[in-house]
Image: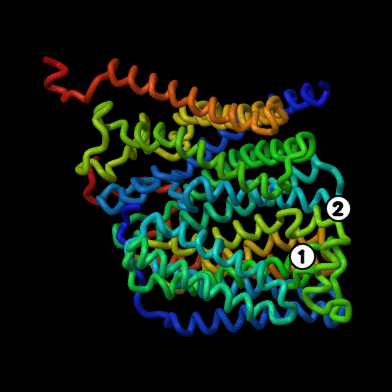
Amino acid sequence: MTVKMEASAGGIPHKTLLIGGLVTAVVCIYLTYLNQILGVGYFAFFGGIAAVAALWWGSDTIKHLCSYGLGTGVPSAGMIAFGTGAIAMIVATKFGIATPIVAVIIAAIIGAIIGYIANEIINMNIPVMIISLTELAIVGALTMLGLASMACGSFLFENMITNGAIVTAVGLSGAENAGILVANIDATGTLIGGCVFAVIFMLGAIALQHPFNACLGPNESQDRTLMLTMECGFLSMIPVAVISYAYLDLVAASVSLVVSLIGFVYTLREYFRLSRRDAYAWLDAKPIREVGGEQ
Amino acid sequence: METIVLGIGITALAGALATVAGAAEDTESDIGSQGDPNSQVQLAPQMGYIHRIFNKAVSGEPPAYGLWCALGAGVAFAFLQILHNPALAIILGSIVAVFVQGVYCVTAYLGRTASLAKFEQPVYIDVVKSLTPVTMAHAFVAIFCTVTMCYLMAEFLHHPFALPLLGLVWGIALGAAGSATGNPFYGKERQYQNQNFGAGVPISASGNIVRYAEAGQRSSLDNGWFTTKFAGPASGICFGLIVFLELWRTVLFEHELGQWGAVIIGFVLIVIFAIIDLWVEKWSRTTYGPYEKAEEASS
């Protein structure tokens, strides 16, 4: 892409977005644990909200990283975020109740290593590379953990490899239990065994890179980009809610679907409003206006 | 023997589905100016050429189609757990995927165009209204065919990958085939019909894409009209051949030479295609030669 990218000045500072996104995402992922405590499924949608919060922060990180002239690097940044995050997230799901925190820590370590390799060994020499890739890895891990817990109602590995019923708080005592479960169940139709995880990976990766990729240009504005991020997040929640009909009960999956649809419709309308505000003109069936190019 | 006959039948059917998918994918991406031709559509207003071309930059075609097909396959896979009806599940999966694709297209056009306000490029909302359904329709054909093909592989050829992962892999392959084979017809040819044939795109012509049609102003539907005839079939043959040959070598030679048969045939195919490519390139270079300037050609 040949367009010169300029990160918009002003707006919400990146640190605020970082703290807000990280805290909201971790808290919302923990709220899905209410499913285990109460033995229900309808708190699963908090996983999706966590993903929206993580993406909200992540798209601003991508903007900072890609304002260093990474043209085609915008979609790649989304992919590397989720590639590194996937490893951290799957490893972390074996840590029981500590899963979200462990996911953040492991993702930060892997992201920092990848950032170091990119900057120092491949010599990309971008000042914010290491910190940005660290942030993006955490975003990737939290988004996937959020969407995965939305699809199967829990962030525990045991639930991601079982089809249907949520393993309740009483029935789990960490990794040993998971080992027994793995040996005894048929995991071919499940979130991890059935590779539904691949869908979550792609949904998150495209949702992360799309907002800045779609809004880049001289008149990019932060509020519009972030609104589009939330729209992408809620849009990603819709298919995950549909998929969750296979793993959760009818009410739980329907609650997720309704929450996603409400969030999606609201953010899409707001995005249209902001686009209309920022556009040079909003024309319907009007001819080309010549401004000096060759006729 | 029966398994091989069934395997060959599935191979042929999958190849046919892939051909349709490839043609639809490329037409969809060309109508939306996705992939590498997007850069010139994006650049045009900055050089003073305001246009009415649909500019949907979701990402490169391979990741985008990776998502659409993985999504179609994933939702179909989930519905298969509940409904046990493959046809219905695949259709529902494709519908969900196309819905997501349509929303991404609309937001990409609005975002890119609104960010070009400095160059006085207006948002032509009728472009979104008239062209998004067209791209969605083509995307539906592409996704449905790819997911059906993946289902055939998973169900009848007993592929070790689950349906969503097959959707992701073949979706990326579909996007790559369409992007590599079909895009030159649009990006190098259709966008630059105002340049001399074979002249390449000089820096001075950057962004000066064709914006007016035979009558009136060119819309992306005109580009679809052009690429359906040339780029679509080329992409279809490309992706169809990839799928057909891939399955053909696996079905026939999987158990030969201690499981290495299919791998060896794969290498042989690569060598054969490399020779064909070399021959085609040599032939076209000797036939058409280097580009000559107009004066020299006329003298």
Q: Residue at x 38, y 23 (%)?
A: B278
Q: Nearer the viewer, mark 2 or mark 1?
A: 1
The residue wearing badge 2 is B82
The dot on residue A180 is none
Q: Residue at x 80, y 68 (%)?
A: A159
- Whether residue B142 is visible, yes or no, is yes
In-front residue for pair A78/B231: A78
Q: Provide the chain ID for the residue under circle 1.
A: A
Question: Considering the image in quadrants, where does the C terminus of chain B appear?
Answer: top left
Q: Residue at x 76, y 34 (%)?
A: B157
Local secondary structure at mark 1 = helix
Which amino acid lies under the numbered mark 2 shown in the image of this protein?
A: Ile
Which amino acid lies under the numbered mark 1 shown in the image of this protein?
A: Met
Q: Provide the chain ID for the residue under circle 2.
A: B
- Whether residue B117 is visible, yes or no, is no
The single residue placed furthest to the front in the displayed view is B258
User: Which color scheme did the rendering employ for the protein?
Assistant: rainbow
Residue B179 image point, x, y percent: 47, 39
On the picture, is A238 further left or further right than B172?
right
Residue A149 image point, x, y percent: 72, 70
The answer to whether mark 2 and mark 1 are in CB contact below 8 A is: no
Label total for image? 2
Question: Considering the image in quadrants, where does the N terminus of chain B appear?
Answer: top right
Q: Residues within 10 Å of mark 1 (few under 14, many from 20)?
A: many
- C-alpha distance separating marks 2 and 1: 17 Å
The residue wearing badge 1 is A160
On the picture, is A274 further left or further right than A41?
left
Q: Residues within 10 Å of mark 2 (few under 14, many from 20)?
A: few
Q: Is residue A140 above or below residue A185?
A: below
Residue A189 image point, x, y percent: 81, 54
